[in-house]
Image (tube, rainbow, N blue to C red):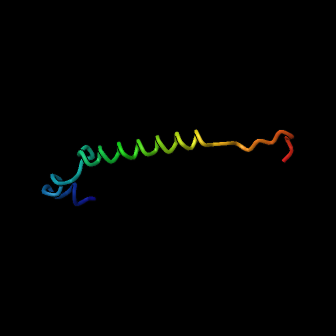
Amino acid sequence: MQSFLKIPVLHMLAPNGSEPAFTLTQGIVLVFYLVTSFLAVKRFRPERNPTGLP
């Protein structure tokens, strides 16, 4: 990590986080978590105990 800061040639090659690959990956991960969260909430069925006893 420090090499990227101290060596000018490496500093030019260091990723800055705004490349298309980073953006695409973040978008895919965001959609994945949104879909899995939605499905988890939709399919959640709490245990029903009408007597109130454990």
Identified at 74% across, 44% down, the residue is 47
* Of the pair 9 and 22, the residue shown nearer to us: 22
On screen, 32 above or below 6? above
Q: Position of residue 31 (x, y in %)?
A: 41, 42
Number of on-image labels: 0
Q: Residue 30: image x %, image y %?
A: 41, 42
- Residue 13 sits in which quadrant? bottom left
Q: Is residue 29 left or right of residue 51?
A: left
Q: Nearer the viewer, residue 23 or 46?
A: 46
Q: Is residue 14 above or below residue 38?
A: below
Residue at the (83%, 39%) spot, across then down: 50
Relative side of 27 to 42, left or right: left
Residue 46 lies, in percent from the top left, at 70, 42
Residue 28: which quarter of the image? top left
Name the quarter where the N terminus is drawn. bottom left
Drawn side of residue 47 relative to residue 6, left or right? right
Residue at x 26% of width, y 59% of height: 2
Q: Nearer the viewer, residue 25 or 41?
A: 41
